[in-house]
Amino acid sequence: MTINQIQDEIISEFSLLDGDKEMTVFYIMELGQKIPDIKESDRTENNIVKGCQSKVWMVARLENDRVHFEADSNTAITKGLVSLLIRIFNSQSPDEILNANLYFMNKIGMERFIGTQRSNGFAAMIKQMKFYALAFKTQKEIAS
């Protein structure tokens, strides 16, 4: 699936919640429970996403020109938020990630149920994922 198809799927899922703040937050936390925990050895200072109020650890690897992400957080809501980004960006190429226009946040009204601090942290997670994509793209260009 493309990044936009995945975003549209997420928008559709959230529309079923009809803007109910409590149900939306619960659903996001539920999504976070579905992603596997990262290895304890990846919970290092180097893997912490800077700019998040909660602790978020993120690692990425490139396999067959596709980026694969793993992440975890010490809070349920933040783990749910990062799980949305993993769902969107996982198994995409570095170029697809770098050129992605993320619009699902506005369409689901995310600003209504996460505060400014979490919004800043969410932006930091996106920035980190795009940074990984850029690093993998640059590595490949240098190697060729």
Image (cartoon, grey):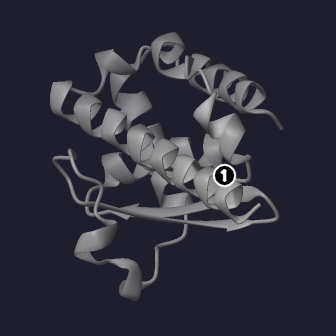
Does residue 4 appear to the left or right of 23 in the view shown? right
Q: Is residue 52 above or below residue 2?
A: below
Residue beneath disc 1: 90
Q: Quadrant of residue 11?
A: top right
Residue at position x 41%, y 48% from top? 128
**Image-quadrant location for residue 121:** top left
What's the residue type where badge 1 is placed? Answer: Asn
SS at badge 1: loop
Provide residue 12's location: percent of width, then percent of height.
68, 21
Residue 17 x/y as whole percent: 53, 22
Q: In the image shown, does 51 or 37 lie closer to the viewer?
A: 51
Relative to 116, is 12 on the left or the right? right
Q: Is residue 137 depicted above or below 15 in this figure? A: below
Q: Residue at x 23, y 51 (%)?
A: 50
Residue 112's place in the image compared with 63, above or below, is above
In screen coordinates, is 59 left or right of 16? left
Quarter in which the N terminus is drawn = top right
Position of the C terminus, as image quadrant, is: bottom right
Q: Please provide percent x and percent y for residue 13.
A: 64, 27
Front in this rendered view, residue 23 or 98: 98
Q: Residues within 10 Å of mark 1 (few under 14, many from 20)?
A: some
Residue at x 43% of width, y 29% of height: 24
Q: Residue 101's spot in the image, x, y percent? A: 59, 20
